[in-house]
């Protein structure tokens, strides 16, 4: 069922891969839209088949889905492997399609983010250092300092005619001169005209110029800029090019002519400002529309969408993208492009071969693939070992070099069974089974590169479950030995013990099975070892330490199934019967009976050592037949004769139980007997005989109140309570939404449902102990776990249920049923007085007898309990309420009776 669900999710993922992104995970559980299905249908048939194979899509189901679009006939696409036009398979093209869609969604054009929020950040200030080649023009201010025989300072501004006047000298024409030339000219004039005086000139203020920034920019228009501004200053102040504008073809126009072109990529990637021309009055900075773009991603430092210039090669684009990362594989560059017929093709390039460098074209998608994460020379050790990990392999390595002592194994390691899983060069799988205890006494196994060595735990989670449940039962038993505890206190303590045991079991189960759950979805440890990177492999190996035997074995079997050769059977054998771990196990070519018994954890104490059986299917050309081979396990273990038979794939080994085998059965007798305690019983033994062994009843015993419980009855009560709780919940839901019924006391009913779900069964069997002892026909055949409690004689009478005050009374010979009810305050409004009943001390239930005059003649005896049930009609006639309250009260009465013992 889970695999069917997973297959459906993967089908959705496959469609969404084409319409959203290739990294959509298998957690998506929505249904693909009609538009997504239509887009999938429009793909060429070859691509559909490739994706269907990869994700398990039913193409027939997709083709039968409703469609409002007529599929156009698409010519099969041509695909090429490299510049020699070698064809690639559909999977490669599908991968390129998926990754291209990822680019569209995730990659951004390179360089444009540089202009975000940067307006004015690069505008030169009026006090900026002025270069020597700056051309002086009208509006610039100069500070002229004269020193020598006399000193003076004066700030002059270049007028509209390009002249300056200072120190009563005639006007000096400086227009068109550079800053250095102006300083030289002034110095010469001062030296000639003013003997003994020299000059120092600096810029006091710069003029503003008006330039135009137009084309594909975010804020085109005319701008007043400092006369020191360059093309980049103008671009930044205008917000920069839009994503339609080119970063590689920015023109500077002056007097109607293009005098310079700027490639911003050189500035952004190399810091080259040589083409960043200084602007003059009236200049135009024009941003052309972008020409051609390509996408570069994968193992590059700066994945993005890049603009092409003339004859841009793949190597140039890789350089623009910051170069290759340390994980890049330069021999495997995928380029998705269009051929002359505008059909897709995929090329695989090798950057180490310069002659194959490729000139990129508009729309190309370039992916740099990573190096393989797989290790070529490694050995993995996992399972029940101290340090699951991967180890470097070298020729001649043996397993003893990795497992040097028992300290390298876990305390729970099965010393009789372990596996080495090896990959064959031709693609198959080879298994070697060995005994870990032999590592320290015999020649060790030779290992091969990429071997996986698995050690197994000799315990299973069920062992822990049994142990904890036994502790919980022991705790409950001890409660009865604590004096002065009320019934409610005992129930609370018992529930606390239950919660602690349940929590412990849950934690153990989760710890040991979470990875097994992953294995069901294909994300098991072996899958990660085969396909994951180093971190994933180490996590997978660490997870194997707490896995059970089957959790470790199942992925190995899946691996065998995936690599089985045509016409061959998967090398597995099933073991059933009296072994510690029945199941299916992989076998080596030379596997024998002893090997498979060791794999299954050995035989149990109840195993028939002289008779076991192999069931073998004999496959022939047209049919198959069964063969049954009997053998002796003890002879096989002792290697006597031919009993250690060789196994064949698909054999079933059945280890029989010993004839008349019976586990040791025990019962407990407590209370007023001469020798209370636990007694071992034989099959068919009766209660009377065991009571006789216990010395009989004491003089203080109350045999009429004997309390006998049985494990099987307790389990049945709990099942009934859970079933009833489920049915009551369903009916509650129905009544809550039905308009034909009145308001339902949802809270009260839900409380009862919760109590029924968690209530502990009693398992009481009503007996008449006096008749059991004295009449053989009333004797009880005992079962393992039975308990008999013989209480001390007591004179109390309990009244519980729907009375004003539920309490106990000292038995009064003259009182009848009505007297006890009235002594408890009488009945409540919701009491069902027609269904009052009496539970005798021995557990027998009696309904009171009334004469025709309405007089109750039921005799009330010491130890009896009077129960006043709830009127089922009081809760809007829920049909299951009566049954629920009845069961719950019976269980409560049982616990109350236990509290009195």
Image (spheres, rainbow, N blue to C red):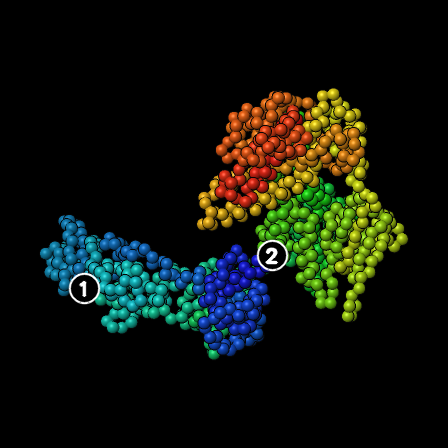
**646 and 900: which one is in front?**
900
Q: Quadrant of the C terminus?
A: top right
How far across and down, in percent of the image, does residue 857 sit? 62, 28
Disc 1 or disc 2, which is closer to the eye?
2
Examine the rendered structure and indicate whether residue 431 appears above or below residue 601.
below
Q: Which mark is residue 1?
A: 2
Q: Which residue is under mark 1?
A: 175
Q: In the figure, is residue 335 to the left or right of 292?
A: right
Cβ–Cβ below 8 Å for labels 1 and 2?
no
- The residue carrying pointer 2 sits among few (fewer than 14), some (14 to 19) or many (20 or more) residues within 10 Å by Cα, namely few
Residue furthest front in the image: 852
How far across and down, in percent of the image, does residue 591 sit? 79, 55
Which badge, 1 or 2, is on the more N-terminal residue? 2
Q: In the figure, is residue 356 to the left or right of 716?
A: left
Residue furthest right in the image: 641
- The residue carrying pointer 1 sits among few (fewer than 14), some (14 to 19) or many (20 or more) residues within 10 Å by Cα, namely some
Examine the rendered structure and indicate whether residue 766 appears above or below residue 369.
above
Provide the secondary structure element on which disc 2 rests.
loop
User: Is residue 489 something that shows in the picture?
Assistant: no
Q: Which mark is residue 557?
A: none
**278 and 674: which one is in front?**
674
Tell me which residue sits at (61%, 31%) in the image.
Answer: 851
Q: How many marks?
A: 2
How far across and down, in percent of the image, does residue 250 sit? 33, 67
How far across and down, in percent of the image, does residue 267 sit? 37, 61
């Amino acid at each position: 069922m889970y695999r069917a669900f997973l297959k459906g999710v993967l089908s959705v993922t496959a469609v969404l891969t084409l319409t959203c992104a290739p990294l959509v995970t298998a957690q998506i559980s929505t249904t693909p839209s009609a538009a997504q299905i239509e887009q999938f249908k429009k793909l060429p048939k070859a691509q559909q088949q490739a994706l269907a194979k990869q994700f398990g899509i039913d193409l027939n189901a997709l083709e039968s889905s409703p469609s409002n679009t007529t599929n156009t006939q698409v010519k099969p696409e041509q695909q090429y492997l490299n510049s020699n036009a070698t064809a690639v398979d559909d999977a490669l093209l599908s991968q390129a399609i998926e990754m291209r869609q990822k680019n569209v969604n995730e990659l951004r054009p390179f360089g444009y983010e540089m202009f975000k929020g940067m307006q004015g950040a690069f505008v030169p200030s009026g006090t900026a250092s002025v270069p020597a080649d700056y051309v002086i023009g009208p509006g610039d201010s100069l500070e002229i300092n004269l020193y020598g025989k006399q000193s003076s300072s004066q700030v002059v501004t270049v007028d509209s005619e390009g002249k300056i006047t200072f120190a009563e000298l005639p006007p000096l024409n400086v227009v068109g001169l550079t800053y250095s030339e102006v300083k030289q000219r002034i110095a010469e004039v001062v030296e000639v005209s003013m003997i003994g005086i020299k000059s120092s000139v600096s810029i006091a203020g710069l003029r503003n110029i008006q330039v135009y920034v137009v084309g594909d920019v975010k804020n085109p228009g005319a701008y007043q800029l400092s006369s020191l501004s360059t093309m980049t200053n103008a671009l930044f102040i205008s917000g920069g090019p839009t994503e339609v504008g080119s970063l590689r073809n920015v023109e500077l126009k002056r007097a109607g002519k293009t005098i310079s072109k700027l490639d911003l990529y050189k500035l952004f990637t190399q810091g080259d400002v040589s083409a960043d021309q200084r602007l003059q009055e009236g200049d135009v900075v024009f941003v052309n529309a972008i020409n051609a773009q390509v996408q570069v991603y994968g193992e590059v430092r700066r994945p993005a969408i890049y603009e092409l210039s003339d004859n841009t090669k793949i190597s140039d684009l890789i350089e623009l993208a910051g170069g290759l990362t340390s994980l890049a594989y330069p021999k495997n560059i995928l380029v998705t492009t269009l051929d002359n017929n505008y059909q897709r093709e995929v090329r695989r390039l090798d950057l180490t071969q310069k002659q194959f460098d490729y000139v990129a074209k508009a729309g190309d998608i370039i992916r740099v693939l990573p190096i393989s994460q797989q290790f070529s020379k490694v050995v993995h050790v996992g399972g029940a070992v101290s340090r699951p990990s991967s180890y470097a392999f070298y020729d001649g390595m043996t397993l003893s070099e990795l497992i040097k002592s028992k300290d390298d194994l876990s305390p729970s390691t099965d010393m009789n069974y372990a596996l080495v899983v090896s990959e064959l060069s031709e693609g198959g799988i080879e298994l070697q089974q060995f005994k870990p205890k032999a590592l320290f006494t015999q020649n060790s196994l030779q290992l091969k590169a990429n071997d996986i060595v698995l050690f197994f735990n000799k315990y299973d989670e069920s062992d822990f479950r049994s142990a904890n449940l036994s502790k919980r039962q022991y705790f409950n038993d001890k409660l009865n030995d604590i004096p002065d505890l009320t019934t409610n206190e005992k129930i609370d303590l018992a529930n606390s013990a239950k919660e602690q045991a349940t929590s412990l079991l849950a934690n153990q189960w989760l710890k040991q099975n979470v990875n097994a759950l992953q294995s069901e979805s294909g994300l098991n440890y072996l899958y990660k070892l085969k396909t994951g990177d180093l971190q994933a492999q180490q996590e997978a190996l660490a997870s194997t330490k707490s896995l059970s035997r089957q959790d470790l074995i199942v992925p190995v079997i899946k691996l065998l199934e995936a690599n089985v050769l045509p016409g061959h059977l998967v090398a597995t054998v099933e073991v059933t019967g009296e072994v510690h771990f029945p199941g299916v196990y992989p076998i080596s070519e030379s596997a024998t009976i002893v090997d498979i018994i060791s794999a299954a954890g050995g035989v149990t104490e109840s195993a028939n050592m002289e008779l076991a059986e192999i069931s073998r299917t004999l496959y022939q050309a047209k049919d198959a037949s069964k063969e049954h081979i009997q053998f002796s396990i003890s002879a096989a273990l002792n290697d006597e004769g031919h009993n250690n038979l060789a196994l064949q794939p698909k054999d079933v080994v059945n280890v029989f139980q010993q004839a008349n085998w019976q586990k040791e059965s025990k019962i407990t007798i407590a209370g007023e007997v001469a020798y209370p305690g636990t007694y071992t019983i034989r099959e068919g033994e009766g209660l009377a005989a065991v009571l006789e062994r216990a010395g009989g009843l004491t003089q203080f015993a109350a045999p009429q109140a004997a309390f006998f419980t049985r494990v099987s009855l307790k389990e049945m009560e709990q099942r009934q309570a859970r079933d009833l709780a489920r049915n009551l919940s369903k009916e509650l839901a129905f009544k809550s939404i039905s308009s034909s019924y009145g308001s339902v006391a949802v809270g009260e009913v839900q409380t009862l449902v919760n109590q029924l779900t968690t209530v502990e069964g009693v398992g009481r069997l009503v007996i008449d102990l006096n008749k059991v002892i004295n009449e053989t026909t009333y004797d009880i055949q005992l079962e393992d776990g039975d308990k008999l409690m013989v209480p001390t004689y007591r004179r109390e009478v309990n009244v519980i249920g729907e009375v004003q005050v539920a309490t106990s009374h000292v038995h009064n010979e003259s009182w009848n049923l009505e007297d006890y009810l009235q002594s408890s305050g009488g009945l409540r409004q919701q009491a069902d007085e027609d269904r009052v009943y009496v539970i005798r001390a021995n557990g027998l239930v009696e309904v009171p007898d009334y004469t025709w005059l309405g007089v109750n003649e039921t005799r009330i005896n010491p130890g009896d309990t009077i129960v006043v049930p709830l009127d089922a009609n009081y809760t809007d006639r829920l049909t299951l309420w009566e049954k629920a309250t009845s069961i719950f009260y019976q269980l409560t009465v049982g616990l109350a009776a236990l509290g009195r013992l």
